[in-house]
Amino acid sequence: MKLATLKDGSLDGRLVLVSRDLKRAVAVPQIAPDLLDALQRWDAVCGRLASTAAALDAGRAEGAFAFDPHACAAPLPRSPQWLDGSAFLNHGRLMEKAFNAPPIPDFDTVPVMYQGASDDYLGPHDDVPMPSETDGIDFEGEFGVICGPVPMGVSPDAALNLVRLVVQINDWSLRALGPHEMKTGFGFLQAKPSTAFAPVAITPDELGEGWRDGRVQMRLHLQWNGQRFGEPHGGEMNFHFGQLIAHAARTRRLTAGTIVGSGTVSNVERSAGSACVAERRVIEKIDLGEIRTGFMRFGDRVRMQAKFADGRDGPFGVIDQQVVAAAGGEA
Amino acid sequence: MKLATLKDGSLDGRLVLVSRDLKRAVAVPQIAPDLLDALQRWDAVCGRLASTAAALDAGRAEGAFAFDPHACAAPLPRSPQWLDGSAFLNHGRLMEKAFNAPPIPDFDTVPVMYQGASDDYLGPHDDVPMPSETDGIDFEGEFGVICGPVPMGVSPDAALNLVRLVVQINDWSLRALGPHEMKTGFGFLQAKPSTAFAPVAITPDELGEGWRDGRVQMRLHLQWNGQRFGEPHGGEMNFHFGQLIAHAARTRRLTAGTIVGSGTVSNVERSAGSACVAERRVIEKIDLGEIRTGFMRFGDRVRMQAKFADGRDGPFGVIDQQVVAAAGGEA
């Protein structure tokens, strides 16, 4: 099942089901007005959503219309929590070097995770307002999951069964602000502006072999201003999503609709490229002896799209965003 | 104006206005069903809420009933963001010693702040489920503000004018988990379970001289299992709430209903006592050479109540909570 949210001026937007080929959509107000509501009543609505999705794919859904990703908000325009892990060890180790930070203790055995703002996500084609080009503007390509209600103390295996939907994420970052916030020990805040999402959230079954071992087994293809930037593979996560969810729920319950992220997709194999600028920069420093790539400028665009192993486009649709100067901001 | 939220099984609860003496309440569904909705439409509803509050105080509000703090959720049972500062330098400096952590860079000139879970707050008399007594269970007495919509890049002075309501907070903490999470640089996550709130949120004018220089000029009286624990004064904040809000909004906007906390209230003057156990423990270590106080146990209670300079009870009501073993938890 594929779901998306059309902007309608409300905080939660308008839920639509999307056809398998991402060409048609249908609103389902008689089942659930928005995705957050559907997630809060998932067991009661899931069957009816699936029936309507099947009708849509069969060309039999009444009121279906052309699906326009540019009209989409994030699948959840706001969510109860946004908890972003850093589950790709290769990324973490490179970022320690990039930030000149001490090694994260137990990084390979205990997940690390920060809590980000979850009240104001960006849609897949929304402009990205940033206050200053001097902040080290960066994208971060990630995968993530949207959970049902998670009890405190859940096991990793049980947590994996609470994954309702899979999403594709651009976790915008300001690299000039990150090191100071890490040194305070209080974690990222100013370094993490609003996070963006690809238009379509999917049930794991939509991925087929692309969802295995609690990981998204797909490459995330990134372009910066139309130039290839990388296509790292999501299967290299050191922890699966069930482990990340269980980590988050160790001392709290997570209410339905909580989003848990993988952290920047990153592979040891250098030829895969990178899913963020900071990682490319530190690789340049290590491999070439100097940093050659600057961070993003106002007007720059980034494009992200997951693809299946056989090269077919993934089911999440495309993130394609432009960085712009925030009102009152400065270059 | 005093506002509270009665539990009614919904996520946002039922908004009531509370009389000046905290004895009577009246629901206002014809104005706003819940406090989050009121905050999102504040300019449109504020006048009518004030009129009804005046009628309630005059004994003329139709449908008024006895106010029962035990029936209350947090004033906002969920909010868009929960951003907790650490604005009392004395607390921060003591906690560095308690955690044996390096000094926080620029701690006296740049606010520090973590983002906490905001989807599942506790009410003033709710039990506090914790997974284990070995986690270092601790309370933290704080003040906080609830904001209207805050634009990105707001100035501290302009931010202060966006304070809609003032609240009293118990920011539950697990001290055995904090140092590791600080060392990762990603900040507190497992170390911060659900946060609790006193029943009544108030407009700043309700405080009179108790709201000055963007700070709550009141003592927060704390008792642990019925024993006096401290009554530190809220005026010793190194940053005022406008500065904290502006810090949070440097690279993001904050949607209406965002809550910003002061961090643990703490005074240099030792006779004021403390607002958390960890602080008392490190003071014992410094002043007496050894830690004499353990953290909280299942069954323990903590009580917090702000008081005016003349000893009158503050307008927030009382937080009085008991720690209990979470389902599946262990002592």
Image (tube, coloured by chain):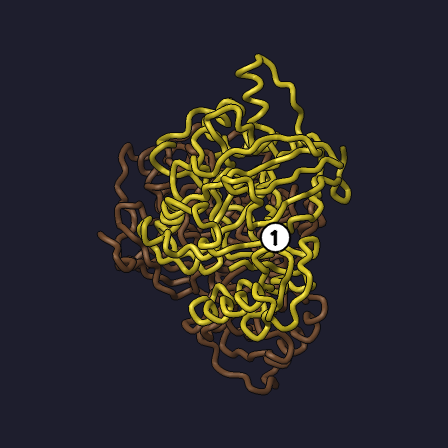
Chain colours: A brown, B yellow
Q: Which residue is mark 1?
A: B199
Q: Nearer the viewer, residue A209 or B109?
A: B109
Residue for point 39% across, 45% down:
B212
**Residue A304 lies in what quarter of the image?**
bottom left
Residue A48's quadrant in the figure? Answer: bottom right
Which residue is farthest left? A331
Q: Is residue B307 left or right of residue B102?
A: right
> What crowding class fits label 1: few (fewer than 14 Cα within 10 Å), some (14-19), or many (20 or more)?
many
Rendered location of residue B4, percent (x, y):
59, 58
Identify the chain of the residue marked 1, using the numbered disc in the image.
B
Amino acid, disc 1: Pro
Q: What's the residue at 64%, 51% (across, down)? A: B123
The residue closer to the viewer here, A305 or A121, is A121
Which quadrant, please, contains the N terminus of chain A? Answer: bottom right
> Residue at 26% across / 50% down in the picture?
A133
Tell me where residue B150 sits by quadrant. bottom left
> Is residue B47 something that shows in the picture?
yes
Q: Residue at x 55, y 28 (%)?
A: B273
Q: Tell me: residue B132, above or below residue A56.
A: above
Q: Is residue B119 left or right of residue B39?
A: right
Q: Residue A103, how many percent across, how many down?
A: 47, 29
Whether residue A2 is visible to the viewer of this picture, yes or no, is no
Helix, strand or loop under label 1:
loop
Residue B235 horizontal/vertical position (percent): 43, 38
Left or right: residue B209 compared with residue A226: right
